[in-house]
Each structure stands twice: as C-alpha cells, then as structure tokens.
Image (cartoon, rainbow, N blue to C red):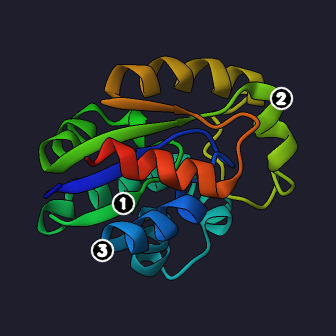
Amino acid sequence: MAGSVILIGMPGCGKSTCGVLAAKALCKSFLDTDILIQERTGMPLQEIIETKGTDFFAETEEAVLSDLAAYTNTVIATGGSAVYYDNAMRHLKSIGRVVYLKVGFEEMMRRIKNIKTRGILLAPGETMEDLFRRRTVLYEKYADDVIDCDGTDVEEVVSAICRTCI
C-alpha cells in the first residue's frame, strides 16, 4: 500500500518499538516525531517541558506534525499527545492511514516505568487517569484502524500493523 502509516496511542503502547519493525516489514521509511521535536529544540522531551513549558512543547509538536508533507511512504510514530492538534491530525490523515495502538489504563501504567522523565505532556493538575480518559476519545476519533495491544507481544502488533496496509 502506498502512503504512510501513522501510529497513535498512549505512552507505552509500542508506537516507536513496533513502528520501526513494521517499517522494515513493509519496506517503508520510519520516522519518530518525538525525535524530530528533540532535534528541533536540541533537548530531550522532559527537559523541553520542564524548561520551556507545556505550551512551547505543544506548539513545537504541532509544528513538527504539520511539517510532515514530504513523508509519503513512511511509518510515522507520533507522540501520545499528537491527537490534541486537530489541524495536524487532519494533515496526517491526508498523507496516510492512522492506526491506533490501543492499550488499557492498567497495561499502560504497567509498561511505563519512567513517567517523571519520559516527556509526557500533562496539563497542570492532570493525573494519568485524566490523560487516559481525555486522549482515548481523541484516538478513537482520528483512527482509521484500531489494534488492541493488551496481552500481545511486539510481533503480533507488527503483524497487525502490516495487515492494515493490505
């Protein structure tokens, strides 16, 4: 299938890990938008949030997502907060298929070992439960395909991503 595959989902769902393997299997390029944000700012995600603030992080993330027009045959792993930007998500849907790697709250929390240093975009006073509820609705809104990742291993998720491209 021509076009890009855009992976969305909660932190720890496997967007980066499974995305690079799916790109190899599909003979596509791989791109991680978190890395692009870090390259653009010269800082790790958590440092951006701590030193420049959540608004700066959000503006940078939205700009990076909106600049992806050149990626036409790529598996793109987005940051978990990509779905906060309607214009950017509409742009991503125009260049490919949006695949939601779905995990439940307990699975997400089990997988994330570094909440304080991972660079998760939390609003002031927002809990991980709040984040989970707010983002789930948006992931479902933008998804062309949903892959349930609870109780699966990397190979199963990669196979499922590849099947969405047939």
Nearer to the camera, 121 or 152: 152
The amino acid type found where label 1 is placed reads Ile
Would residue 72 appear left or right of 60 to someone viewing this image? left
Would residue 56 appear left or right of 121 to someone viewing this image? left
Q: Where's residue 125, x and y in %?
A: 74, 27
Would residue 46 appear left or right of 25 to someone viewing this image? right
Name the residue at 87% across, 42% down.
110
**Element at label 3:** loop
Q: Nearer the viewer, mark 3 or mark 2?
A: 3
Report the residue marked by disc 3.
27
The amino acid type found where label 2 is placed reads Glu
**Vertical side of 97 occupied by 51: above or below:** below
Q: Which quadrant holds residue 154?
A: bottom right
**Vertical side of 33 occupied by 138: above or below:** above
Q: Which quadrant holds residue 121?
A: top right
Name the residue at 55% across, 22% down.
136
- Specify few, some or many for label 2: CA neighbours under 10 Å numbering under 14, 14-19, or 20 or more: few
Residue 127 in view of the camera: no
Q: Where's residue 22, x and y in %?
A: 44, 63
Q: Are marks 3 and 2 in contact (CB under 8 Å)?
A: no
**Element at label 2:** helix
Please report whichever mark, 3 or 2, sits nearer to the chain's N-terminal start. Answer: 3
Q: Are marks 1 and 3 in contact (CB under 8 Å)?
A: no
Residue 34 in view of the camera: yes
Report the residue marked by disc 1.
76
Q: Which quadrant holds residue 23?
A: bottom left
Nearer to the camera, 25 or 148: 25
Nearer to the camera, 137 or 103: 103
Rendered image: mark on residue 95:
none
Distance between the alpha carbons at the discs numbered 2 and 1: 25 Å
**Vertical side of 136 occupied by 61: above or below:** below
Rendered image: mark on residue 106:
2
